[in-house]
Image (cartoon, rainbow, N blue to C red):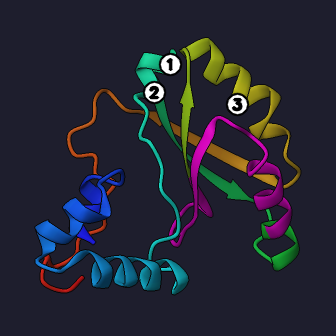
Amino acid sequence: MAELQSDGRITNHDLAARVGLSPSPCLRRVRQLEEAGVISNYVGLVDPAALGLPVTAFVRVRLDGQDDRHLAAFEEEVARFPEVMECYLMTGESDYQLRVLVASLAAFEDFLRQKLTRIAGVSQVVSSFALRPVVYRTAIPVDKTDA
């Protein structure tokens, strides 16, 4: 798992060599992990700033109702916004936390005013802006001997 997470384009031959297996059992094991849903997808990681999206905002949202109907309605709407990279249902003072990527502060204002606050039931929005990433990982921590 650690090897695949660090290089999703690695060949089966090279992966087998790195993990100490022959290619056939290695490929079989990768297929089993895919079929079990442990490996859900292969992606290329893109630098947002290189595509003109240098502003990362973390947005905490509170709804005026926390029943299943309100939660489902919010989740359905927010999933439609391409600016929302992640959305988590939270405990504590906020109901949701979003990670939003935009081109500028003006673009964030448009997102906030024209999209997010227009979702029925949104009662409070608190935003913070990332100055720079300190730690950014995409790999899930796994013991290299486990998988």
Residue 71: x percent and y percent? 78, 68
Residue depicted at 12% across the width and 83% down the height: 145
| Mark 1 residue type | Leu
Give me the C-alpha separation between circle 2 and circle 1: 5 Å
Residue 74: x percent and y percent? 79, 58
Closer to viewer: mark 1 or mark 3: 1
Provide the secondary structure element on which disc 2 rests.
helix
104 part of magenta stretch: no
Q: Are marks 2 and 3 in contact (CB under 8 Å)?
A: no
Q: How many marks?
A: 3
> Which quadrant: the N terminus?
bottom left
| Mark 3 residue type | Leu
Residue depicted at 20% across the width and 71% down the height: 16
Q: Are marks 2 and 1 in contact (CB under 8 Å)?
A: yes
Residue depicted at 62% across the width and 12% down the height: 106
Provide the secondary structure element on which disc 1 rests.
helix
Q: Residues within 10 Å of mark 3 (few under 14, many from 20)?
A: some
Q: Earlier in the sequence, mark 2 or mark 3?
A: 2
Report the residue marked by disc 1. 51
Number of the label disc, if any, that sits on residue 48: 2
Residue 102: x percent and y percent? 57, 24
Q: Is residue 90 above or below residue 107?
A: below
Q: Tell me where residue 118 sits by quadrant.
A: top right
